Image: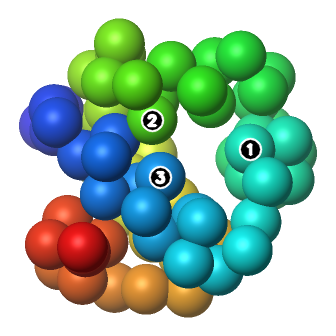
Amino acid sequence: MIITDAGHNIKKAREFRGYSQEWMADQLNMGQSNYSKLEQKKNKIPLDQLMKIAEVLEMNLKTLLTFG
């Protein structure tokens, strides 16, 4: 399953937590430019990756997808 259009919520949640894109990318084992594309909605986000992002942001998936 692939979720699209979650990038805006991910960005808001990251900023709410005070995390940088670089820090998030490091936690997710990816480059900052690839992470940035997630937030810009340039990439579709697989469900397993969304779940990892929610974990890093200390949120459940439903909260992340409806954040903001």
Decide: is 29 above or below 51: above
Reading the chain from its start, which is encountered first: label 2 or label 1? Answer: 1
Question: Would residue 58 be seen by someone viewing this image from the given angle?
Answer: yes
Alpha-carbon distance for marks 3 and 2?
A: 6 Å
Q: Nearer the viewer, residue 18 or 45?
A: 18
Name the amino acid type tagged 3: Lys
| Disc 3 + disc 2, Cβ < 8 Å | yes
Residue 21: which numbered mark, if any? Answer: 1
In the rendered image, residue 27, in percent from the top left (x then y), is placed at: 80, 55
Q: Is residue 22 left or right of residue 58?
A: right
Residue 41 location (% of width, % of height): 31, 24
In primary-sequence order, the first of circles 1 and 3 is: 3
In the displayed structure, 39 sits above or below 58; it is above
Residue pointed to by mark 2: 39
- Identity, as a three-letter code, of the amino acid under mark 1: Gln
Disc 2 and disc 1 in contact, CB within 8 angstroms: yes
The residue under label 3 is 11
Residue at (80% x, 23% y) in the render: 31
Residue 50 as seen in the image, left or right of residue 21: left
Q: Name the kind of residue labelled 2 in the image.
A: Glu
x%, y% of residue 3?
Answer: 16, 38
Mark 2 element type: helix
Instruction: Locate the C terminus by quadrant.
Output: bottom left
Determine the image quadrant of residue 7: top left
Question: Which callout, 3 or 2, points at the residue further toward the start of the chain?
Answer: 3
Residue toward you, 41 or 50: 41
